[in-house]
Amino acid sequence: MKKIVGVIAIFILTTVAVQAQSISKNALGIRVGDNDGFGGEVSYQHYLKENNRLEFDLGWRSSKNFDAFKLVGLYQWVMPIEGNFNWFVGVGAGVGSFDAGNNNDGTFALVAGDIGIEYNFDIPLILSLDVRPELGFNDSYSDDLDLDIALGIRYQF
């Protein structure tokens, strides 16, 4: 009986360890997509605990109406699906600056949500697709909801 309990305990601990390893300690890469114009971001993810991580994105957006730089921080919950796939949701906030031409420039703040799916390759590479609804706050330019849809590729270490 003790052997059976021991085997079950080892199996459970191994399963928990495998689940905990589904998020790498760190990941660094790029995130490119569309949100009122094409843009790109340098993206960094940092493991916090079993199924949680922080993500920081620093990037720019460019369209015919404006150019903008922004920094966004997100807290994410990551859940395994099957195989090397995970899905994730998150919440966060950010700040940025924009130039809309005609001496119309300034700063803004935003709150954001995040939902997406990712694939962990057998090499230290992760590919993701996510949608980030962002609600911006600014007196002179834009107080609206934007959907930031992006493809991410990150090196895990």
Image: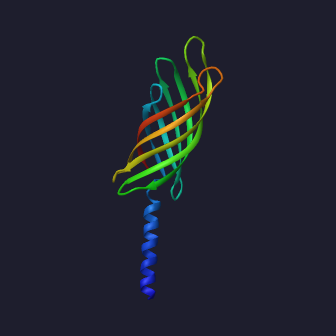
User: Looking at the image, how many numbered discs can be counted on the residues?
Assistant: 0
Residue 37 location (% of width, % of height): 45, 25
The N terminus - image quarter: bottom left
Q: Residue furthest bottom?
A: 1
Q: Is residue 103 above or below residue 144?
A: above
Is the residue 59 above or below the residue 82 in the image?
Answer: above
Residue situated furthest top in the rendering: 102
What residue is drawn where x is 53% and y is 24%?
Answer: 68
Residue 12 falls in which quadrant of the image? bottom left
For the point 57% across and 22% down, which residue is it? 98
Q: Is residue 149 above or below residue 97?
A: below
In the image, taking residue 122 as reference, residue 98 lies left or right, namely: right
**Residue lying at 64% horizontally and 20% vertically, measured from the top left:** 140
Residue depicted at 42% across the width and 85% down the height:
3
Q: Position of residue 74 (x, y in %)?
A: 55, 43
Q: Position of residue 113 (x, y in %)?
A: 54, 41
137, above or below 153, in the image: above
Residue found at the very far right of the displayed protein: 139
Q: Where is residue 76 drawn, in percent x and y?
A: 53, 48
Which color scheme does this rendered protein use?
rainbow
Q: Is residue 132 left or right of residue 97?
A: left
